[in-house]
Image: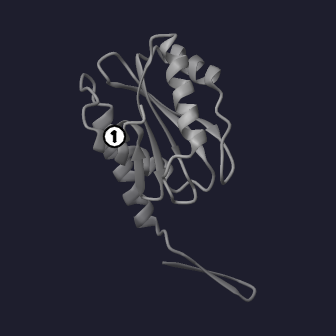
Amino acid sequence: MNKIQSENITVYNVATTSENDTIAAALSILASRLNVAGVALENPKDTQDYLTLKLAGKPAECFSVLFLDNRHRVIDYRELFQGTIDGASVHPREVVRACIEVNAAAVVLSHNHPSGVPEPSRADISLTKRLVETLQLIDVRVLDHIIIGGLENISFAERGLM
């Protein structure tokens, strides 16, 4: 634990270099599991863990997309929209543009809730339905929408919301 002192205030920085190195190594391992050439994305748990590591610590909402080919192999991961502590504006046309750009056949949507509570809001459910309908027009399947709240996550597919 690093101790930072300024005037009469003492702040403890809990994340040490070794912890940051461990997190970076974990992200690298999960990314390699998802990006192995010729290996399809078959394990929802690995996908959820990867997205949790990518989005859990963000102080504001961030909407990301995991782009997949027709065999559900990862093409790319992008954080498309940044928001505030309680919302992010997501524009379907930009999601469509990114899908076409990388030639995606399927996607996994994800965003974080900085509050730490991963329960989907009505707006989250409505946005997901709108993106599913929009992406169907260009033959891109939405496999899941995962909401990250702290170290917990909610899968729309597992909840029957897709």
Residue 100 place in picture, x, y as percent: 53, 13
Secondary structure under the numbered disc 1 in the rendered image: helix
Q: How is the image coloured?
A: one colour
Which three-letter amino acid code belongs to the residue tagged 1? Glu
Who is closer to the viewer here, 7 or 126? 126
In the figure, 152 relative to 12: above or below?
above
Q: Residue at x 57, y 59 (%)?
A: 115
Residue that carries the numbered disc 1 in the rendered image: 158
User: What is the count of numbered marks?
Assistant: 1
Residue pictured at 36% horizontal, 44% vertical: 48
Above or below, 53 against 109 in this view is: below
Q: Position of residue 15 (x, y in %)?
A: 49, 68
Instruction: Depth check: give the residue in front, 88 or 2.
Output: 88
Q: Is residue 110 left or right of residue 87?
A: left
Residue at x 55%, y 18% (from the top left corner): 134
* Within-10-Å neighbours for mark 1: few <14, some 14–19, many 20+: few
- Residue at point 40% right, 66% down? 18
Query: Which percent across, then down, holds residue 138?
Result: 50, 10
Q: Is residue 143 above or below residue 154?
A: above
On screen, residue 127 versus residue 34, left or right, reads right
User: Horizontal and vertical percent for residue 142?
Assistant: 43, 25
